[in-house]
Image (spheres, rainbow, N blue to C red):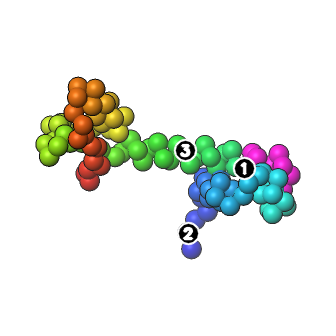
């Protein structure tokens, strides 16, 4: 049996609401909550989810390719890879791609 993790539970509630319900009111009705309590739970879960997703993205590393040539000599975060790719596209290169690298 795994220990109870409030953050994970809140995130799962948010994802259930996001994927399966059209309104907070229906979600609240299903869980026998007030609309206000349901909104608070979903909001907390969303914050936790977005923070976790940001942290996951920050751990990922990317490189940029032009044609069959790697344009970078080191790995960068996604935002930097997008900036490099856009710079290359602005310079007239059309076969520019970003690749996630396993590190």
Q: Which residue is mark 3?
A: 50
In percent of the image, x 31 and y 30: which residue is there? 86
In the rendered structure, the answer to whether residue 29 lies left or right of residue 67 reads right
Q: Is residue 55 above or below residue 8?
A: above
Label 3, label 2: how far apart the Cα atoms are = 23 Å
Q: Nearer the viewer, mark 3 or mark 2?
A: 3
| Element marked by disc 1 | helix
Of residue 29 and residue 65, the one placed in the foreground of this image is 65
Q: Which residue is mark 2?
A: 2
Label 3, label 1: how far apart the Cα atoms are = 14 Å
- The first of marks 3 and 1 along the sequence is 1
* Residue 47 percent across, percent down from the top left: 60, 43
Label 1, label 2: how far apart the Cα atoms are = 22 Å
* Residue 37 percent across, percent down from the top left: 80, 49
Q: Which residue is mark 1?
A: 41
* Residue 6 percent across, percent down from the top left: 63, 55
Q: Which mark is residue 65?
A: none
Is there any visible trace of residue 6 in the rendered image?
A: no
- The first of marks 3 and 2 along the sequence is 2
In the rendered structure, the answer to whether residue 61 lies left or right of residue 5 reads left
* Residue 76 percent across, percent down from the top left: 27, 37
Span highlighted in magenta in the image? 33-40
Q: Is residue 75 above or below residue 31?
A: above
Q: Residues within 10 Å of mark 3 (few under 14, many from 20)?
A: few
The overriding secondary structure of the stretch rendered in magenta is: helix
> Marks 2 and 1: in contact by CB < 8 Å?
no
Q: Quadrant of residue 58?
A: top left
């Amino acid at each position: 049996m795994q220990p109870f993790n409030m953050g994970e539970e809140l995130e799962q509630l948010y994802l259930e609401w996001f994927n399966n319900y059209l309104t907070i009111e229906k979600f609240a009705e299903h869980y026998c909550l007030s609309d206000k309590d349901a909104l608070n739970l979903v909001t907390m879960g969303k914050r936790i989810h977005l923070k976790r997703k940001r942290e996951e993205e920050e751990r990922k590393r990317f490189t940029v390719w032009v044609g069959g040539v790697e344009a970078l000599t080191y790995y960068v975060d996604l935002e930097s890879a997008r900036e490099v790719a856009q710079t290359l596209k602005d310079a007239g290169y059309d076969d520019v791609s970003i690749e996630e690298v396993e590190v």
